[in-house]
Each structure stands twice: as structure tokens, then as C-alpha cells.
Image (spheres, rainbow, N blue to C red):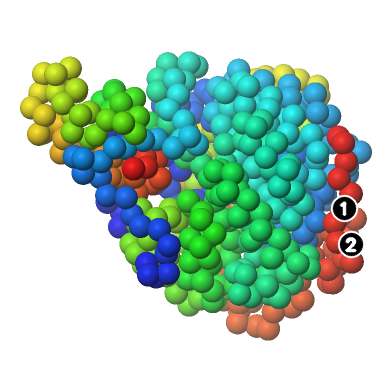
Amino acid sequence: MNEHSPSHIKETVMPLGACEPSEEQKDGAEIADTTCARAPIGLLAELTHRCPLQCPYCSNPVELERANTELTTEEWQSVMRQAAELGILQIHLSGGEPTARRDVVDIIKAASECGLYTNLITAAVLLKREQLEKLKEAGLDHVQISIQDTDARPENADRIGGYKGGSAKKKVVAGWVRELGLPLTINAPIHRHNVDNVAGIINYAVELGADRVEIAHVQYYAWALMNRASLMPTREQFNESAKIVEKAREDLKGIIVIDSVVPDYYAKYPKPCMGGWGRGIINITPSGRVLPCHASESITGLDFDNIRDKPLAEIWLNGDAFQKYRGTDWMKEPCRTCPRHEIDFGGCRCQAFALTGDAANTDPACSLSPLHEQWAKVADVESHNASPEFVYRRPGGASRKPGMQKSPATSEA
Amino acid sequence: MAEAAPRVRAIIEATTRPIMPPHIKLRHDASRGRWIILAPERLFDPDDVAVDVLKLCDGQRTVADIAEHLAKEYNAPANEITADIVEMLQDLADKGVVKT
């Protein structure tokens, strides 16, 4: 594994999924040093918070935004043009479920026309083949489909997602993606209800024709934090899954790329969350709030700008929320004098806030945090207790039972 | 695990005719004044040699053709260039950036 890349090309793993850094990034000699200092590289566009699935680890905030506050088609198209002018290279169209908006085609067309690389992050269950064809015509570059488990365990998958028939539908849509010649990534959030099937999930991704699979241990913010006692795997389960990933990377070299995300509570060093705050990534919520990361609204006291009020460039360069934890000047000990502080940037500000009450503290995911052992112990205890029922992700309040509606109505806006 | 896989690893040799699939974009990034490769959730930062090689990866030329072309351009021995290119393209093939 871990062989060095040939000297002619440096690889940067986009930090959106908080993936393990590439070898160059671990060395601190990443591309970001030369390209991200002034201009962001990626934009996560949450087109809507509506979603037919109700996954208990959803990365959306617990307070979901309502459909009647969403940006219009024209406003999103303007965002795309501004993003390209600002130097952004990749657009990740996400949600909620981005295809719950019929105008996703018009938004992708606008992005594609200004040279942006477009990635559709979808639960796939609402997609029709005809719509997928239109998305491809509009210039869509890549499709990422999330799964909850393999097609051999549909009951488990559908229970986790709170959507009956979801597993089977995802398989059909993945087939269409490949038939249309679009590249496919399978994203599998991993937790104690599917951690025993990591090998199966990787093979399923190969079977579906995916070029890439993300074995993404759940990150415990927002809904996932609320459901942590239900989702946290044991340290032994995590270690076993990591071994399976290592072996599969060898066995499937050249067949599928496997990216993995470690569960923070079992990490030695924190992930370089978002590649550093306000350094390479922008997130825009359905109503136009411009955030340094999708979870940053959980930090109280930050002031967020809205794209309806100010140009994107001005928000990126001068916005209060972006400036607050940009660079390393805000750091306290042990981060301030740590030799790794420009590798991992002290981890995740949102997690530091959620677990310590101060976003400027070291993320307790780091073994150098004075609180690390305490939180590792919480994970250990919770993961060995019986799993409480899920609190399903649902607008207007959490519920221990999945909702009855099959899917929300799609809308024009 | 490999036996369950319906696909095989692409091996780069002198006779291989490599090509970048349509979803991999080699673009000049005007705002940063350099070339960049856009891939799913990845960016690759190619140096001048890599850019020269990748521009010649059209699915028609073999690796040997590319090496010969660049040997003239760089005034360097083709066999050394071939070894260098094979290593680079194999790594890119394993990452899905180049197909055969």
C-alpha cells in the first residue's frame, strides 16, 4: 500500500468527505498549499433539505430548512457562475436529495457551461432514467449514490434509510448510470448496523460497476450525534473493518478505488476537516447561507452571510464565519505549537464545539486533546450497550419510527 | 475478493494505447495559471512532463509512440522515458485516471 505517487503528478483527495489525506497531503506538501491560499477549490451546494430517506446519521443540521426558503433556479445559476469566477473547480450537488428539485438539470447546465466539474450526490430513489439522461446531456460529470447495505440485505438497508424498496431502486439506478457511461461512486456510511458487512459492500460496489467506493464511517455531528449510541461501532469492529479495507485495496488495485473515513472517536490524529477552515471548501445551504462547512451552523455565535445579500467572493474573503477559524492564529494549545497544525488544522471545529463547548479547542478526536480519553471511553461504553432505536431524520422533529410517506412531492423550484 | 470482481486491472506496457476517459478532465486552470486534472472527488496536479504525456494519450498512440515522440522533443533516450511513462501511467490507471 501507501506507495509514493510518481513524481510527475501530485494527488489531492478532496476533503469534502473528510477522507484520509493522500500521501502528499500527509507529508504536508499538498496541492492545497499552492492553490487554496486565495481561492476555494470545491463548493458543496445543498439544493434542498427535502429527502425521501430518513437516515439517522444524516449530515444535514437537525433544524432542516423549509422548501419555501430555497434559492430559486436563477439564484443557483448565479452561484455557479460566481463560483467559477472565484476559481472553484468542482461542484458537489447535494441535499437533502438534490433530484427532489426538478431544476437540478438547469443548475447543472449552468455549472457545466462555465467549466465546473459537476458531481451529483444522490440517494437515487427519486431518479427516473429519462431524468438521468437529461442530466448527462446537461454536462453532469459524475454520480455518487449512497447505499445503506448490500442488495443481499435489503431489509436492513431499508430499515436504516427509513424507506421501503430503497435498496432495490438504488441498484436499478446504479445500472442506468453505468449504461449511460457516467462514472459511479458508491458511498456507504458505516456504523454498527452494517460494519459487519464492509467486505460485502465493497464487492457490491464492484458488482454495480462503480469506479470508486467510500467506506465512510459515520461522522458524529447533528443527527449522527443524536444517534451516536445507536450507531457507534466497537473499536474491535472498526479495526476489523480497517483491515478489510486494507486488504481489498490490494486485491482490487486497478479495479476500484477505495476511500475510507475513520470514525473520529477511534482516531489517533484528527482529520483535516474540510482541508482546513475557510481554506478550500464552501458550503451553501438551500436558503443561500454560505458556510465554511455543512455543520458549522451548530457553532453558536458565528455570523453567516447569505448569497442573496453579498457576492460569493466577498463572503469567502471577508465573511466573519470564514475569517473566524481560518489559518492557525486562532489556535490554542496543544494545537498552537503542534508540528501537525498545518496538516490537520486541529481537526473539526464543529466537533470541538459540540464536545468541549469551545470551537477553538483541539478536536477531542486528537489523542493530544486532554478530553480524548474521556470521549473514547464514551464511545467504548455506548458501542457495547444495546442499540437504542434510531431517531430518524425528519423535518419538523425527530421520531423513533420512520415516517409513513413514501416520497415527498418534487417541485419546480 | 478479487475473484468476485468482474473486471481486471489494466496493465500499462509499451504496446498499450492509453486514453483518459471522458469524465477525467485535463484542464488549464486560468485563475491559477497551470494545468489540472479533475476527477471524481480528486484533483491531480501534473507537472509539465505529465501534461505532455497525457495530451498524447488519445487511445491511438502506444506508450512506445508517446515515448518516441517525447524522446525527440526532450532530446533524451527513449528507453528511459518509456520506463518513466509506464510507471506514471500505471499509477494513473490504478486510480482510474487513464484507461486502456
Q: How many marks?
A: 2
**Host chain of mark 1:** A
User: Which amino acid lies under the numbered mark 1 shown in the image of this protein?
Assistant: Pro
Q: Residues within 10 Å of mark 2 (few under 14, many from 20)?
A: few
Q: Residue at x 66, y 30 (%)?
A: A138
* For residue A153, above or below residue A69: below
Q: Which residue is mark 1?
A: A408
* For residue A72, above or below residue A369: above
Tell me if label 1 and label 2 are in contact, CB under 8 Å.
Answer: yes
> Which image quarter is the C terminus of chain A in?
top right
Residue A167 position, x and y percent, is: 69, 65
* For residue B41, above or below residue A282: below
Q: Residue at x 71, y 47 (%)?
A: A129
> Which image quarter is the N terminus of chain A in?
bottom left
Tag 2's secondary structure? Answer: loop
Q: Which residue is mark 2?
A: A405
Tag 1's secondary structure? Answer: loop
Q: Is residue A61 left or right of residue A273?
A: right
Q: Residue at x 44, y 74 (%)?
A: A240
**Host chain of mark 2:** A
Q: Residues within 10 Å of mark 1 (few under 14, many from 20)?
A: few
